[in-house]
Amino acid sequence: MTFKECRTAIQADLGRMTRPGFWVGLKYLVFNASYKITFWFRIGGYLKSKSNILFKVMYAFVFLVYKHYQYKTGIQMPLGTLVGNGLCFPHFSCIVIFDQCIIGNNCTIFQGVTIGAKRGRNAGSPQIGHNVVISPGSMIIGNITIGNNVMIGANSVVIRDVPDNVVVAGNPAKVVNYEGPYYVGLQLHRGNA
């Protein structure tokens, strides 16, 4: 990851909450716990990819700060996880994201979500597309693919592939609507795609 990519990701994450800008970003970095975790996640991911000794020392400091905010927010997302720009946690607590999963741009993750791997049959971890809304209490488990423009309903357990532009819900999750998240009025959570 280059510094420019890191800065773009930070601006996109902030853009999901408010208008990007230095002073607005500083205000959110001081007062908004959801933005703090994404900010330090991006900085830590950037520093983790560097081999220079100065970057390694800075990474150790950022790692400690990030760990502090992980405990404070209840979001477990290892540094270096492949997450696209525009990540948003409208509410936080009890969020677990496996480090091998891949998450696309403009993903909204609510509280109580688990994105995890599976062993045995269907072993592997999820790949999540762009503009996905994952509602509270949902679980996405195993080597599956979630399409673009998808909404996953509250308390859903997703164990099979999900096509583009649908709403899924239930345990196990099934398609309940083929008109995508726009149909249920979630335009505000999509960000600036």
Image (cartoon, rainbow, N blue to C red):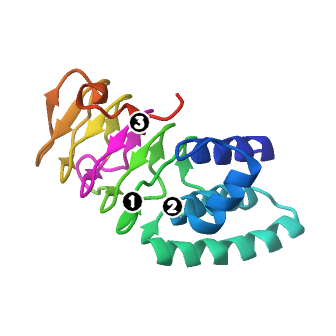
The local secondary structure at tag 1 comes to loop
Classify mark 2: helix, strand or loop.
helix
Relative side of 46 to 96, left or right: right
Relative to 121, say whether 127 is above or below.
Answer: above
User: Going from the N terminus, do you reach mark 1 or mark 2 first?
Assistant: 2
Q: Are marks 3 and 1 in contact (CB under 8 Å)?
A: no
Residue at x-position 65% and y-position 67% = 30
- Report the amino acid beneath label 2: Ser
Chief SS of the magenta region: loop
Which label number is shown at residue 188?
Answer: 3
Q: First in sequence, mark 2 or 3: give its number.
A: 2
For marks 2 and 3, give the CA distance: 17 Å
**Residue 29 part of the magenta segment:** no
Give neighbour class at mark 3: few <14, some 14-19, many 20+ (Cα, 10 Å).
Answer: few
What segment carries the magenta color? 120-142
Residue identified by numbered label 2: 34
